[in-house]
Image: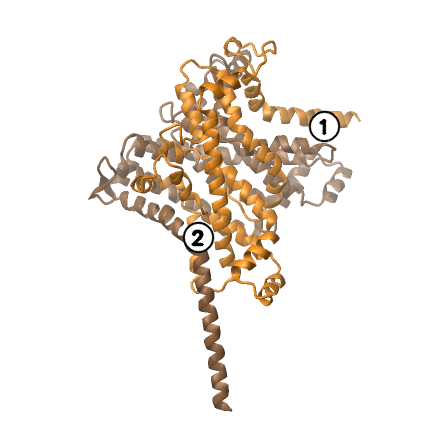
Amino acid sequence: MIKRTIQYSGLTLVALLLLAPLLVGLWASLLPTTDIAMGALNFHHLSLANYAAAIQTTPIVRYVLSSFVISSLITIGQLVLCSMAAYAFAFIAFRFKQAVFFTFLVTMMLPFEAQIIPNFQTIKALGWLNQYAGMTIPFLTSAFGVFMLRQAFLRVPSELIELGHFLGLSHGQTLAKLVLPYSRSMLVTFGLYTFLANWNQYLWPLITTFSDQYRPVQVGLKQLQAEDTFANWGVVMATAMLALVPTLLLLLGGQRFFKRNLNAGGVKG
Amino acid sequence: MELNETHAVRRTRRSLLAWVRGDERVAFGLLAPSLFILALFTFYPMLATLVNSFFVTNIAGVTTRFVGLANYQAVFGDPVFIQSLTSTLVYVLAVSSLTVLLALTLARLATMKLRHIGWVRTAFASTMGMSAAAASILWLFLFNPSVGQLPQLMQALGWANANPLADGQGAMVVVVLVSVWLHLGFAFLILLSALQSVPQDYYEVAEIAGVSSLKQTLRITVPMVSPTLFFLFVVEVIASFKSFAEIDLMTGGGPNNVTNLLAYKVYLDAFGLQKFGPASAEAIVLTGLIALATWVQFRFTERKVFYG
């Protein structure tokens, strides 16, 4: 009994320590900035005033909506295009297959951070700067996704594919009616992961967006921080919380998928 | 009869060929959109960066004159770049090893046989749902010299310098701390699932034999999950080489370029100073380092980690 109590208190302490930055931020977002400035983090003046101010006086809602649009389009695009490519690699014999697969693998070794200069010029030439197109189209597929889904598709029993063949299903039908439903769990994991990763994108929107209309929330936070000359910490914390809510909820719902599936495919961070 | 057979064989072969060719068309159709996007937004820019690194460019980024390795010579002769390279290696090694070590500790704690352990796991995994940008804002508040909680705490504990972001070493420590915190959630989840595959009887036997938990971790857990530990370490190395938002929001590369990590320097030189040639050379160095780490991951971890 005593041992249990010590174990639980220890675990709670570690958990609180890890969550501390989030909890302090949440607490501060509920306090008037005057209290924060005095270092008085008590609970006499708790209110949602900072959130009201953030929504009324900053474009935070617009930022969050942009992020939703961008991340959703990328996630849908990757689920479709990566599934298609992964199916070809898993189930179709074609010439130069190994070479093409190797090409996909090689792109995983090439960091996006090193490609920003020509990519910026390409997007500029296409007239896609400060547009959703420029923030989504380059990311509609990923070698990592193709690789991860191919691994999942290879675990589909070959009897199922043969059955599809006997029933006269085309490749498209086999993919849509047999392979995708069978790999549902991995598709959910990959979808959640893609949404999360793209919701958190920072460098690319930093160099390709210039107006509040298209700015996603991560660089929106930088914008608000830079504009905030009065150090209005309460409002700043409220905006940070609003930016965090969607992905924290997503993690809460998707945790078991991540745990089960991220190990299996050999995943990057 | 013989003639017929040949006909039949030929017909079969022809139809087989047609089938394969038809299939090839399907395969190409399925691969084409992905190949097109990767060609335009990964291979072309990588090649263009390599080419640019051998040229002088004008302010618009158009290559004007071939200069051979001059950009590389300039870059490696630049003390700021050497500083950046050194800082990057220190940062990457510190973040990767601390993340793996702490994630292993958390995973051990979260596999204790207790009820309601689910909540603890969710708390431990929580930072995976946080963006580097939002996390930086949270930590900037905590470290703010006038309103933050940590400087007060540090002063109370007798720290002379209560504004760590203002000095080089302090800023590096803060950036490492924030990055480790951010990476912990993901690393924890990966290790949690690995640790759950270790047979419980091993621990039970060790428990009966009176072996301490630390020794259990070192003698049972670490050997059993060593492939995952190695895999995770390499994944963390690659991720750390790419850290950007923490730097941009917390230090801007300062003070005195101590936290001006390679990925950030590429951005500053290209989009701040319009030095596209040298920035491209730096980008190629960054690519080399990350490609090497990724190669290690493919070469040495693939087979072993795939049992997961």
- The tag earlier along the polypeptide, 2 or 1, is 1
Residue A176 in the image: x percent, y percent? Answer: 56, 55
Question: Along the horizontal axis of the image, is B81 left or right of A260?
Answer: left
Residue B183 in the image: x percent, y percent? Answer: 53, 34
Question: Would residue A211 be visible to someone looking at this image?
Answer: yes
Kindly report the distance in space between the C-alpha atoms of the residues bearing marks 2 and 1.
47 Å
Q: Which chain is depicted brown?
A: B
Return the residue nearer the eye: B21 or B91: B21
Q: Label 1 is found on which chain of the structure?
A: A
Question: In the displayed image of the protein, which residue is found farthest to the right?
Answer: A1
Check disc 2: other Cα within 10 Å, few if <14, some if 14-19, many if 20+: some
* Relative height, residue A44 to residue B4 (above, below): above
Q: Which mark is residue A104?
A: 2
* Relative height, residue B14 to residue B87 (above, below): below
Q: Amino acid at mark 1?
A: Gln
Residue B285 in the image: x percent, y percent? Answer: 35, 41
Residue A79 in the image: x percent, y percent? Answer: 51, 47
Question: Along the horizontal axis of the image, is B171 left or right of A15?
Answer: left
Q: Which chain is depicted orange?
A: A
Label total for image: 2
Q: Amino acid at mark 2?
A: Phe
Q: Which mark is residue A7?
A: 1
